[in-house]
Amino acid sequence: MNAIQIKNVSKQYKDVMALDDVSFSFEYGKIYGFLGRNGAGKSTLINIIANRIFADSGEILIDNDLAKENMNVHEKIFCMSEVDLYDTSLKIKDHFKWIEKFYNSFNKEKAFEIAEKFNLDTNKRFKALSKGYQSIFKLTVALAIDVPYVIFDEPVLGLDANHRELFYNLLLKDYEESENTIIIATHLIEEVANIIEEVVLIDKGKVLLQSNVDSLLEMGYSVSGPASEVDAYCIDKNVIGDDELGNLKIAYIIGKKTQLSKESHLSFANMNLQKLFVKLTEKGGN
């Protein structure tokens, strides 16, 4: 099976269960949104996949090969991390030279081309870059490596709107030209909602759901109007949350709509991914 398979993975830090018997797969050839609030367990799982830390139990398979301490999967996966793992005293152009030695699939010429598009000064040392340009350097490296699985962990931290848009455009262009698996781990749902195909939602170390984005959005809707009417409508519904303002109320519901009477003051609206994420994680999901 061409996929990253996570099988019954658990990881605990003292009294915090970061991952609790997590099982799911990132299949080859899709763009995933790996979503969760800060502290949900996203970075812990990514670091286990990338062999930076080890699980207490369970296993990770990449294309059916065990990932743990296995050099055979080295050229299959690359993880862009929000954590700074680079020598801060080296110039960016020298980083490119070293990365080329460690990854056969790293395209140094492409890296310089991407750096130019971002106006990244490759003669600067890593520590001399702003936080935003440090992120841009790490994005440049990830975009210039041709591997089947690329993970971006909070990729746009510190980037302005223009640089974020440029990143997403370059990402989609690469995906169209050489299909691979892209995993974007983030809590900024609105920014990735239009480019991801599949969603994995994690909260408090557990997977709340995994679904195709279109199917997921079809599962839910909102109903709004006078609070008393909304409450009456929701009696037999699977309500995942609500918002109130005075005597008005919006309820967020998983399931099918039921027809409203002609006298009803209620109205329906589609659920967006951001709102679904917020309501499912507010109370740990259902």
Image (cartoon, rainbow, N blue to C red):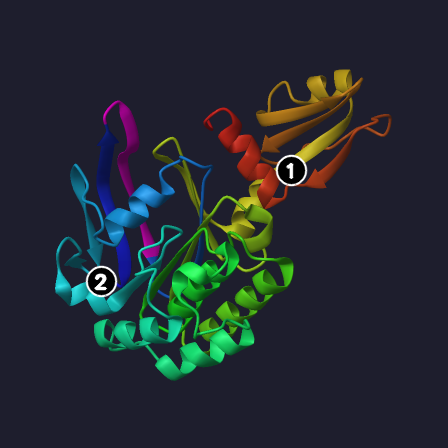
Is 188 placed left or right of 109 in the picture?
A: right
> As shown in the figure, which amino acid type bears the numbered disc 1?
Tyr
- Residue located at (26% from left, 73% from top): 98
- Residue located at (76% from left, 18% from top): 227
Q: Which residues are magenta?
A: 14-26
The secondary element bearing badge 1 is classed as: strand
Relative image position of residue 278 (x, y in whole percent):
56, 34
- Residue located at (21% from left, 50% from top): 60
Relative image position of residue 128 (x, y in whole percent):
45, 61
Residue at label 1? 221
Is 202 placed left or right of 166 in the picture?
A: left
Residue 257 appears in the figure: no
236, 21: nearer the viewer: 21
Relative image position of residue 269 (x, y in whole percent):
72, 40
Q: Main secondary structure of the magenta part?
A: strand
Q: Nearer the viewer, mark 2 or mark 1?
A: 2
Q: Report, in whole angstroms, how far the alpha carbon at label 2 lies from the one at label 1.
A: 37 Å
